[in-house]
Image: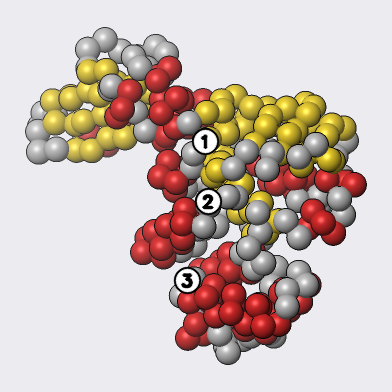
Amino acid sequence: MLIKINNLSKSYGDLVALDNLSIDFSEGVYGLLGANGAGKTTFINLLTDNIARDSGEILIDGTDISHLGIRYRRLIGYMPQQQGLYDQMTALAFMHYVAELKEIRKKDARKQIDELLGVTNLSKAKTVRIAEFSGGMKQRLLLAQSLLGDPKILFLDEPTAGLDPKERIRIRNYISSVSNGKIIFLATHIVSDIDLIANQVLILKGGRIVQFGKPHELSSPLVGKVREYEIIVTESSDPASLCIRLQKQYKVSNFFVGKNSLHVRLVGNNLPTGGKDVPSNNISLEDVYLYYLSDE
């Protein structure tokens, strides 16, 4: 399966959300990174055919999705960022409702629903009204419904937002386990989730692609632009004030205060002398994100 996007554009009045975007996607997990307003949600809404494009093509194996109609909707699963759920329904009723909308046979639906509620750790709460769910439980239910029907193209908008670390790992691992033979788009601000499971990463800024490639490919150009420093802390110095001054001058990826020193990791083109360059295999996707998007 191949998704081919040609010259895709979308504006809201004077605001350009996507600007003449062209890119191809084959099977794999694609991480979408960008600050708020970068175009991630607009990108997903266009590919799910939820909003109309201004111009351009979105082709699935050579056919525009606008000509596929219900055939395209049977291919996709969508987890929106906003938790628009039917609060008076139980989780079980909601899953059966979505299965019916997707035209899944009842026998198949029962089996899939049991499995998905188990994977998302909602089996014990399946007869509880959604109104009584926590934000994290609603997030897991949205993920479960997106996987009904074994979609070949999956759109996940902030799938682990609001989850505790244990649940994030559980959901992240499950997404990875079902990725074979699918095209999965994962939009999130949790960079570590993308770093661990994405085959390729797409970085958007102002509706344009600023970088696209495998995580290690994005790290290589930053050699010499990520550097670590050890600053000796004296009794008269204030580590907190020093950190604030550094953040005003440089992009600070990380720092921690030791017993007698401050360890700082800086990212940028014009770094102070001294310090130690971080090798490519230790440059994280967070460093990459900070380098390209910190001004937003």
* Residue 60 placement, left or right of 257: right
Q: Percent position (x, y) of residue 165? A: 37, 60
The answer to whether the residue labelled 3 contacts the one labelled 1, judged by CB atoms less than 8 Å apart, is no
Q: Nearer the viewer, residue 128 or 66?
A: 66
Between discs 3 and 2, the one toward the N terminus: 3
Total tally of numbered discs in the picture: 3
Between discs 2 and 1, the one toward the N terminus: 2
Between discs 3 and 1, the one toward the N terminus: 3
Quick check: can you spot residue 41? yes
What kind of residue is marked 1? Gln
What kind of residue is marked 2? Asn
What kind of residue is marked 3? Val
- Residue occupying the point 27% across, 18% down: 277
- Residue occupying the point 83% across, 40% down: 63
Q: The residue tagged with tag 1: helix, strand or loop?
A: strand
- Residue occupying the point 65% across, 54% down: 152
Q: Quadrant of the C terminus?
A: top right
The vertical placement of 28 against 107, above or below, is above
The vertical placement of 83 against 97, above or below, is above
Q: Quadrant of residue 73?
A: bottom right
Q: Percent position (x, y) of residue 112? A: 59, 75
Quick check: can you spot residue 14? no
Q: The residue tagged with tag 2: helix, strand or loop?
A: loop
Q: Circle 2 sits on which residue? A: 180
User: What number is the disc on residue 13?
Assistant: none
Q: CA distance from mark 3 to mark 2?
A: 17 Å
Q: Circle 3 sits on which residue? A: 119
Q: Circle 1 sits on which residue? A: 200
